[in-house]
């Protein structure tokens, strides 16, 4: 399991990193909110542990931005902010769980594994229609044939699969693309999103899947009638 630990307390971060690695996690540490946001939007982590009191960009802002771009990513907030209003704000911003400091490591580990049990089935791979998708290996096939996707087409398909049966908004797509410059700085514009949707639709023609435009809202991935999923 690849885990992102966003914690500005160096002593606590070192201790947690050692304990998490001993528990079987691959840990990447972010010492501030700007680094945490960048890594969470650019790297395929399985779960995140996020402090709210981060420097540069506060944890609540990071959480909102990451949640918009990666709706399926499990996020556990780990913070000293323990008031009811703080917990409600964290959960409303998109946290899947909320643990206050001080804490016992066995409880943190148990909560992380509970989050992963709930989200792992849709978190790393998918079999839908005639499409096979694996985030870990960054491979996708349609009827056994490799699907050639540009980085932004990959991000778009990832978002659509993560929110199957839910609308993916243009704002979510723009956020997912915000830190990626591999295909031009203007690729986040609405008309460019439509171009990428059109390209992805063509590549999914034999997959038994359809991308439906929900006017005024965004896009919805559906299994076509008569196809399994």
Image (tube, helix red, strand yellow):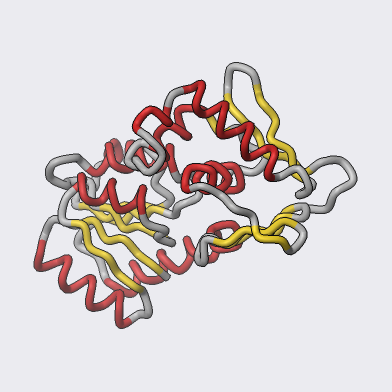
> Which image quadrant: the N terminus?
bottom left
Against 25, residue 51 (above or below) is above
Q: Where is residue 224 in the image (x, y as percent from the top left)?
A: 81, 41
Front residue of this view, candidates 116 and 65: 65
Front residue of this view, candidates 109 and 62: 62
Q: Is residue 133 left or right of residue 225?
A: left
Q: In which quarter of the image is residue 46?
A: bottom left
Residue 92 seen in the current view: no
Q: Position of residue 117 (x, y in %)?
A: 54, 66
Residue 139 seen in the current view: yes
Q: In this view, does 64 lie to the left or right of 132?
A: left
Q: Where is residue 148 in the image (x, y as percent from the top left)?
A: 59, 53
Residue drawn at (52%, 66%), measured in percent from left and top?
137
Front residue of this view, candidates 188 and 3: 188
Residue drawn at (64%, 43%), measured in percent from left and top?
164
Q: In this view, does 65 lie to the left or right of 132?
A: left
Against 171, residue 64 (above or below) is below
Q: Where is residue 7 in the image (x, y as percent from the top left)?
A: 19, 57
Residue drawn at (23%, 72%), measured in percent from left and top?
17
Q: Is residue 165 left or right of residue 15?
A: right
> Hey, which residue is sitting farthest top in the picture?
216
Front residue of this view, candidates 144 and 135: 144
């Amino acid at each position: 399991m690849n885990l992102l630990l966003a914690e500005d307390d160096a002593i606590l971060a070192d201790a947690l990193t050692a304990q998490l690695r001993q528990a079987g996690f691959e840990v990447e540490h972010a010492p501030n909110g700007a680094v945490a946001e960048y890594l969470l939007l650019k790297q395929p982590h399985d779960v995140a542990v996020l402090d709210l009191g981060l420097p540069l960009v506060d944890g609540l802002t990071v959480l909102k931005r990451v949640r918009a771009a990666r709706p399926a990513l499990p996020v556990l907030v780990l913070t000293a902010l323990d008031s009811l209003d703080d917990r409600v704000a964290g959960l409303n911003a998109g946290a899947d769980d909320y643990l206050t400091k001080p804490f016992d490591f066995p409880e943190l580990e148990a909560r992380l594994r509970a989050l992963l049990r709930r989200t792992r089935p849709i978190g790393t791979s998918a079999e839908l229609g005639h499409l096979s998708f694996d985030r870990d290996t960054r491979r996708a096939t349609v009827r056994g044939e490799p699907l050639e996707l540009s980085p932004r087409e990959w991000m778009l398909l990832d978002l659509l699969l993560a929110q199957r049966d839910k609308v993916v908004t243009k704002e979510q797509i723009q956020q997912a693309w915000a830190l990626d410059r591999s295909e031009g700085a203007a690729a986040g514009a609405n008309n460019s999103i439509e171009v990428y949707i059109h390209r992805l639709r063509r590549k999914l023609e034999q997959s038994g899947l359809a991308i439906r435009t929900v006017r005024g809202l965004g896009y919805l991935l559906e299994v076509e009638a008569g196809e399994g999923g």
